[in-house]
Amino acid sequence: MLTEVQVRELLGELQDPFLHRSLTETNGITSVKIKEEKNHVSVKLAIAKANTPEQMQLQMKVVEVLKGAGAGSVGIRFEELPPEALAQFRGTASESEAQDLLSPLNKVEFISIASGKGGVGKSTVSVNLAVALARLGKKVGLIDADIYGFSVPDMMGIDKSPVVRGDTIIPVERFGVKVISMGFFVEDNMPVVWRGPMLGKVLDQFFRDVEWGDLDYLLLDLPPGTGDVALDIHQMLPASKEIVITTPHPTAAFVAARAGAMAIQTDHEVLGVIENMSWFESKETGKKEYLFGQGGGPKLAEELQAPLLGQIPLGQPDWNEEDFAPSVYLEDHPTGKIYGEIAEQILAQFAKKQ
């Protein structure tokens, strides 16, 4: 009959599939129970990322080791290591692990930009927020994950395609932001008519087969709503912060609450709310007109118990034909300054959590 000490010694030699450290090193054996009358061993293990194929492989090893040592039956439950436990292993990754964006050892911070419905300016916010973070000296990437409604390349005035070297895609860089989008791989603005599983493979390629290099932040422009693509992304990422976009209109805020609730249900933190199209300011009179009403952003922030990061007026950037980017605001434009302030708030939030 196995003892608890023997079980811990046997399993302690197995490795966490993501951290590549023994379960003894990670303190990953959180519980061992033995029922002598049934010769049953029950264990609870904590690993870097649960509900993955790697977990299944580890599960099979655990059963093999314990039954090989005499256990009649084995019960296993998995949980994820707490963030503070993972933090001590970050920065110790091998080069290949560090390149894997989905590895819990990677230091990149994911920020998902979500909305409950289309037409609220989510992609515009994603683009300008990415540019604002880059202007603050951060290394920024942007994935246009709105597979059906890709628009980021056009918004940023990108007229080049990514370079493919062997099996690796080199993202296009614009305004200091590395960008990848389905729009780069579709000819003549053709619609994407793929089903969910195919789209999931594309997203996995965006994470694993793109040479992102050293990033501080990777922003994801999610498709609107709570469909398959958004759910796939939430499940792929080891951890993500989410910003929810709404307009002041009560219906937009009501629908956006679902996107925030989805983030919470999938264990992703809501970083804050941005209210877009908050007002229109006349250049002639300076008077603000609240075309879509008032209150949607603050109400949504209160409902999600997250800060209101900023309110952005309705308008368009000043276009420059020499460096054309139809949706990017200049740094000294009044709206560009609002994006800069929002970016500073976001960095301050991350600094507090370190």
Image: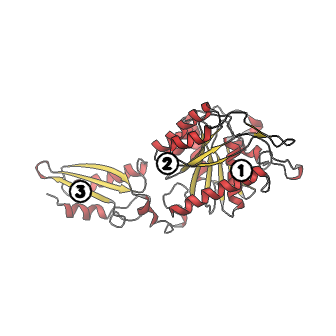
Residue type at numbered disc 1: Asn
Q: How is the image coloured?
A: secondary structure
Residue at (72% x, 41% y) in the render: 151
Label 1 belongs to which residue? 128
Residue 268 disc label = 2
Q: Nearer the viewer, residue 151 or 166?
A: 151
Q: Residue at x 50, y 39 (%)?
A: 261
Task: Residue 32: give its label.
Answer: 3
Q: How many marks?
A: 3
Amino acid type assigned to the residue bearing label 2 in the image: His
| Residue 23 appears in the picture as rendered | yes
Of helix, strand and loop, which one carries label 2?
Answer: loop
Frontmost residue, 202 versus 221: 221
Q: Label 2 vs label 1: CA separation? A: 23 Å
Please tell me whether mark 3 or mark 1 is closer to you in this view. 1
Residue 73 on image: x %, y % = 21, 48
* Displayed quadrant of residue 226: top right
Whichever of labels 3 and 1 marks the residue nearer the N terminus, that label is: 3
Q: CA distance from mark 3 to mark 1?
A: 51 Å
Outermost residue on the left side: it is 37
